[in-house]
Amino acid sequence: MIDDLFTRIDVEYQKAKRKYPRFCERFLTKDETFDNIKLMLGMCRRISDNEKPNYSVQATLDEEVYEVYEAWCRNDLDGCLQELAQCGAVIIRAMEFVTKQKKQQEKNKCR
């Protein structure tokens, strides 16, 4: 199953490269501030902590994305790459979740 998910990502990646050959003039929007990122990250962490132990994709991904922005603002490029990889891991796990839901939906249609 994991190979199918990576294939889907690669297909979308290749399409995006063709559609938008130039990508990212900057990392953050021009008016974004580190203070705002820290505030949003704190909010995301509170939401995620309140979900324990039943995390949602939304809360988990929101928190990971703001950790990317925080690392970027601190000029921690290794940390930024690690956080981006963690976002990728959350995306893969979310795809697994949706795939299971889809299979269950298809199984229920057959009844």
Image (cartoon, helix red, strand yellow):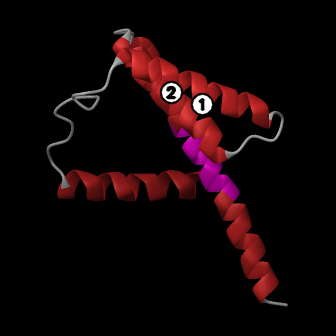
Closer to us: 17 or 36: 36
Q: Which residue is mark 2?
A: 40
Q: For residue 105, which quarter of the picture?
A: bottom right
Dots 2, 1 in contact, CB < 8 A: yes
* Residue 105 visible in the displayed image: yes
Report the side of 46 relative to 33 (left or right): right
Residue range corresponding to the magenta coloring: 88-97
Closer to us: 42 or 8: 42
Picture layout, residue 104 above or below residue 72: below
* Residue 81 visible in the displayed image: no
Report the side of 97 relative to 38 (left or right): right
Q: Amino acid at mark 2?
A: Met
Q: Which residue is mark 1?
A: 44
Q: How many marks?
A: 2
Q: Secondary structure at mark 1?
A: helix
Callout 2: few (<14), some (14-19), or many (20+) C-alpha neighbours within 10 Å?
some
Q: Secondary structure at mark 2?
A: helix
Instruction: Report the magenta stretch's main SS.
Output: helix
Picture layout, residue 42 above or below residue 100: above
Closer to us: 103 or 65: 65
Quadrant where the C terminus lies?
bottom right
